[in-house]
Image (cartoon, rainbow, N blue to C red):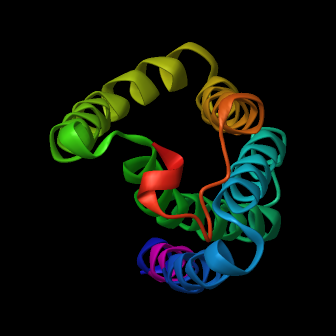
Amino acid sequence: MTSIWWTLVITLFQVPGYYSASFLLDKIGRKKVLVVYLFVAGTSSAVLSLIVSLGWVLIWSSLISFFNLGAWAGLYAYTPELYPTEIRGTSSGTAASFGRLVGILAPLITAYLYAASGLLLPFVAFSFVHFLAALLVLTLGIETAKRSLEEIS
């Protein structure tokens, strides 16, 4: 019963994470929201890889849940705006399909990393992916908030 309770609590943190990011997207900009939310999710994953106390596991897992789903809110708003109008639907669908494929493979990869090192490698990998995404958005991303799609193209 405890694991179900923890899963519920951690999952519930996704709701305010998603809505807070959605609210901030137009207030401070998509690029800033994505970089901050991805970076904090990556940092939380890195810290969680080092934590052994159950209380801290709940806290850091909740932070990952909050900021990771917040980053998804940003990604779903931001990335379609970057594609030219002529290929926006196809490009968004292709990106979503790739994400689904990785989502299918992630449990297998996570299980392999866990078997190799315990909790260290899976959370280091999660952290790396979040940091890489934050760095790519920071260095290559353009701000699209308050701009028309014609301006962005």
Indicate left or right for 92 with 138 as reference.
Answer: left
Where's residue 76, x and y in %?
41, 59
Q: Residue at x 45, y 29 (%)?
A: 110
**In the depicted structure, whether residue 60 falls above or below residue 55:** above
Indicate left or right for 15 with 97 as reference.
Answer: right
Identify the main secondary structure in magenta. Answer: helix
> Hey, which quadrant is residue 9 in on the image?
bottom right
Image quadrant where one finds the N terminus: bottom left
Spot the residue most to the front: 150
**In the depicted structure, whether residue 116 falls above or below residue 93:** above
Indicate yes or no whether the magenta region holds residue 100.
no
**In the depicted structure, whether residue 121 falls above or below residue 65:** above
Image quadrant where one finds the C terminus: top left
For the record, the magenta segment spans 5-11
Residue nearer the viewer, 113 or 139: 139
**In the depicted structure, whether residue 115 falls above or below residue 79:** above
Indicate yes or no whether the magenta region holds residue 8.
yes
Where's residue 74, x and y in %?
54, 62
Q: Residue at x 48, y 75 (%)?
A: 11
Where's residue 67, x and y in %?
66, 64
Q: Residue at x 60, y 77 (%)?
A: 17
Indicate left or right for 44 with 150 as reference.
Answer: right
Where's residue 19, x and y in %?
55, 85
Residue nearer the viewer, 61 or 74: 74
Q: Residue at x 65, y 38 (%)?
A: 141
Spot the residue most to the top: 116
| Count of marks placed on residues | 0
